[in-house]
Amino acid sequence: MIPFVDLEAQYHEIKPEILKTIEEVLDSRKFLMGDYERKFSKEFCEVHGSKLGVGCSNGTSAITVALRSLKIGIGDEVITPTNSFFATPEAIIEVGATPIFVDCEPNGYGIDTQAMEAAINDKTKAIIPVHLYGNPSDMIAIKSIADKYNLKIIEDCAQAHLASMNQKAVGTFGEFGTFSFYPGKNLGAYGDAGEVITQDEDLLRTATMHINHGRVKKYKHDFCAGNFRMDGIQAGILSVKTKYIVEWTDKRIKAAFLYDELLKTKGFKTIDVIDGAKCVYHLYPIEVSNRDKVMDNLREEGIGYGIHYPIPLHIQPALSYLGYKKGDFPITEKAAERMISLPIFPEISEEQIEQVCDVFLKSAKA
Ligand SMILES: Cc1ncc(COP(=O)(O)O)c(C=O)c1O
């Protein structure tokens, strides 16, 4: 048995520290935001490479908070790739704006920057690139297009903790970077949690208020916002895990390189990383022409896998009102039919990777 993700191995490694931290939070009764959130945000910003950041309830609310902090809402359009998880457009819709989808590029599967530029019009207010699978989108091109048209950038870094482009951390190129600490993410809480990072103090203040009922002080509310607070137990747990994130990320990269060596060389197409970028391999997706057969084969041999993502966003039933149809974004649609994600997590051994590849190669066709 090789699981798709093994959260148990990691938990056992750090269990005493985790239990001690939970006890500390309970003893302190600092259950929401406050000291534990501040401590974690500082540590996360240091290790990730951001000046400022604030914790929030999850990666979806992080995007909502970023959009609201930039005053994006009804009548505005936000450009984002159709190759992403549903949360990205969901947050855009939550604030009353309209997601405008564009295709991904075929090598790294990030937003196609030419298509992105072509989609810009008078209503466009922001771009949300998604560093899917942990692979940085072309932030140099995206930033230069955003500057040319005076657009805001929110980088969805939910899958890309510690990823970078030319040594600059993802999430620091535009106004905001947003993170998810969903348990299976590269840095995962034991529940829901998220983070908004920014390099601008005013934006940090506004985002912090949007996270907590539009207030700085208790019972004085400057605007209507909502409650998207991070809880103290999750912040404490994340502080413990942040100590290991560099090591865990290196192990993921090493695992991915071994997969590359064993599979890319056999003619299979997987993530290409642009020059100067550091991909942190939240996932290891690979394209095959006979996915059903490969899935059956892996299942029979007790090997976990995932599909990221089987239905592109533009043809999701919930978004049919936007008027997109099958055929609109052929690169994402083709990837959605061909991609299968193989097991990857820091503790996966070389032997396990070799075993996955042996089984995969028995049935997979490029
Ligand atoms: C690309 C992307 N964006 C946003 C999110 C939303 O994060 P959360 O589940 O913490 O709300 C996720 C999480 O799965 C994600 O993968």
Image: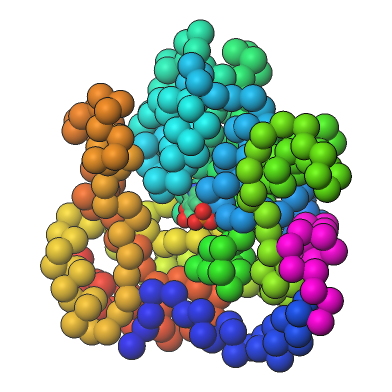
Location of the N terminus by quadrant is bottom left
Q: Is residue 35 magenta?
A: yes
Q: Is residue 344 visible?
A: yes
Please state which of residues 200 and 351 is positioned toward the viewer in this rendering.
Answer: 200
Residue 2, percent across and down?
37, 83
Up/down of 145 relative to 263, above or below: above
Q: Is residue 90 magenta?
A: no
Residue 7, percent across and down?
51, 79
Please state which of residues 134 and 199 is positioned toward the viewer in this rendering.
Answer: 199
Residue 226, percent across and down?
63, 43
Residue 254, percent across and down?
55, 70
152 lies left or right of 204:
left
Point out the residue furthest to the front here.
Answer: 219
Residue at the spot x=50%, y=61% of the render? 282
Magenta residue span: 27-42
14 lies left or right of 321:
right
Residue at the spot x=26%, y=72% of the render? 360
